[in-house]
Amino acid sequence: MDHERAVTRLAALGQTHRLALFRTLMRAGPSGMPAGALARACDLRPSAFTFHVAQLEQAGLVTSWRRGRNIFYAVAIEEMRRLMVHLTEDCCGGHPEICGGLSDAIAQSCADAPACEVSE
């Protein structure tokens, strides 16, 4: 992942409501949540919800789909993994043991997911 993409994604997460939306979707898992339930869970009015979730979607951290009359949102797991790998790939100046296995765990998680590519 290039630095510009990482900065865009980190900037999207660097706001209270968007971070709350992202964390709520992380708890929901890959099946995601309907828009209304997500907005209520994060105590957001519809207009604020639409603005903030659009920022996350434009950054590539959230995906959406329509099911009947409902719109569902979920975390883009592979993109979140790519961001985490980018943040930790040079962990601890060649001493990954300092990181408590974080970089190894992320790399292993990425290796277990065939669609995840460590470098772009």
Image (spheres, rainbow, N blue to C red):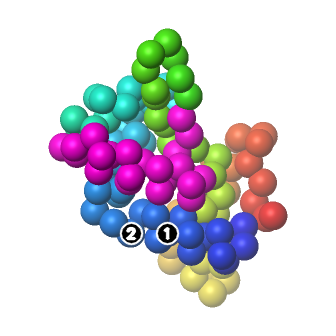
45 sits left or right of 113 in the view:
left
Q: Pointer 1: what residue?
A: 10
State the image coordinates of residue 102 (x, y, percent, origin top left).
53, 63
SS of the residue under disc 1: helix
Label 2 element class: loop
Do the residues under discs 1 and 2 have CB atoms within 8 angstroms?
A: yes
Q: Which is nearer the eye, 110 or 65?
A: 65
Badge 2 crowding class, 10 Å Cα cut-off, few under 14, some 14 to 19, many 20 or more, is: few
Residues in magenta, as a range: 43-64
Q: Position of residue 38 (x, y in %)?
A: 31, 35
- Residue drawn 74% across and 48% down? 116
Direction top: furthest residue = 68
Q: Nearer the viewer, residue 22 or 91?
A: 22
Q: Amino acid at mark 1?
A: Leu
Indicate the quadrant where residue 6 lies: bottom right
| Amino acid carrying mark 2 in the image | Gly
The residue at 78%/54% (across/down) is 117
Find out whether residue 69 is within the magenta segment. Answer: no
